[in-house]
Image (spheres, rainbow, N blue to C red):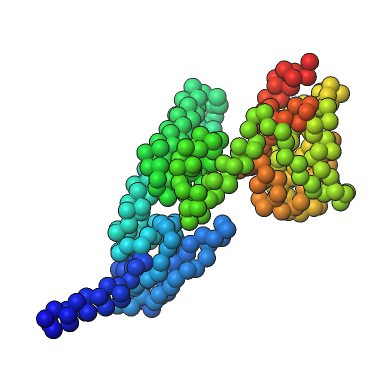
Amino acid sequence: MKHLIYITIILALYACSEHKGYIIKGIADGFDGQTVYLQQFNDSKAVIVDSAVVKKGKFELKNTVECPDYCLLYIGNNGPVEFFVENSHITITIDAEDIMASVVSGSHENDLFAGFSARINEFGKQSKQLNDEYMALQLSEVADTPEEASVLAQMNNLSQERTKFMSDFVEEHPSSVVSAFVIANVLSHYGDIEQFASVIDGFEENHPSQWVQTNRERLETARRTEIGRKFTDFSMDSPEGQPVKLSDYAGNGKYVLIDFWASWCRPCRNSNPLVVEAYRKYKDKGFEIVGVSLDRNHAEWTDAIHKDELEWRHMSDLKFWDSEAVKLYSVNSIPYAILLDKDGRIIEKGVHADALDELLPQYLK
């Protein structure tokens, strides 16, 4: 009986001492003496959460995560190894020739992520090949050839295939944090986040993943900016430094285009002539534009306004992508424009400059 009690106590002590979080064991031949850094993201910034020194070609990291999360691992200045960490026993075999090709095992979520990444890398290689072909044709003596049109069509088809693959992946793995990561960091830049509402709503309300919470916030914002919703007001400064509200113009009897742009955004600057043309053509027919800049530098912002002859109203808080308006209107890329009706209700989203001349006559009758 005494022996049985002794064994029971030993097992209980072992159970209490067993690490409940993750244990990352690394094999890193040729890196002795170098420091391994593990980074996670906090408010879009990479933060070092753990470190260890490589000894005899090995290292070990121990910690705990609330839920699986995307991580970056560096050895000195080499890296990163991208993977998903979760509370399990994980092994990383470092590839000294190409550290980003290192092999990670022991994490179910990372197995999903690795499969996803491998397919995305294949798309990247195909895209580069087509882009190289297209550039070679562009540099040839004969322009606008059928070959160019064919390559462009292939590039477009490949882009659609890539987006479909990502969407299908999310739908096939709706409860995976990897899917939440993909939506937050990739798919939200390709289309309306509402199409993934069922996946986002499927996670519990207080889920600890930052990617789940990011998607939830963006979905809530998107729902506030659905077609037919009244605009959300905000206040910023004019180029002259005077406070301006969106409501100073929106909902006051004119059709208003909220135009998100920036002086540093080349596509914005390239599309500005078309916006100028539309404004001059329709400004006396009940059309107004409010330019919301994502600039950081006041001089660069105002210089671009003058150079591009942007004659309409302007406002900015000079906070770049941290602008209040970005959060309120779920702006993921620029140029981006929203059209409001006379009462300030959203009637069009993602309006392109080259579509204004066809779109506006439908409303300005």
Q: Residue at x 79, y 48 (%)?
A: 236
Q: Position of residue 90 (x, y in %)?
A: 31, 63
Closer to the camera in the image, 38 or 28? 38
Which of the 4 image quadrants contains residue 82? bottom left
Closer to the camera in the image, 87 or 339? 87
Which of the 4 image quadrants contains residue 62? bottom left
Residue 231 visible from this viewpoint = yes
Which of the 4 image quadrants contains residue 76? bottom left
Q: Residue at x 54, y 29 (%)?
A: 141
Closer to the camera in the image, 87 or 72? 87
User: With 225 as the anchor, is 235 left or right in this view?
Assistant: right
Q: Residue at x 72, y 40 (%)?
A: 232
Residue at the outermost top position: 365
Q: Residue at x 77, y 39 (%)?
A: 291
Q: Position of residue 212 (x, y in %)?
A: 49, 49
User: With 5 as the anchor, is 13 left or right in this view?
Assistant: right
Q: Is residue 264 above or below residue 69?
A: above
Q: Position of residue 272 (x, y in %)?
A: 74, 35
Q: Is residue 5 above or below residue 127?
A: below
**Looking at the rendering, in which quadrant would you find the C terminus?**
top right
Residue 75 visible from this viewpoint = no
- Looking at the rendered structure, the number of numbered marks drawn on it comes to 0
**Looking at the rendering, in which quadrant would you find the N terminus?**
bottom left
Q: Is residue 266 above or below residue 99?
A: above
Closer to the camera in the image, 279 or 108? 108
Q: Is residue 36 above or below residue 316?
A: below
Residue at the outermost front position: 1
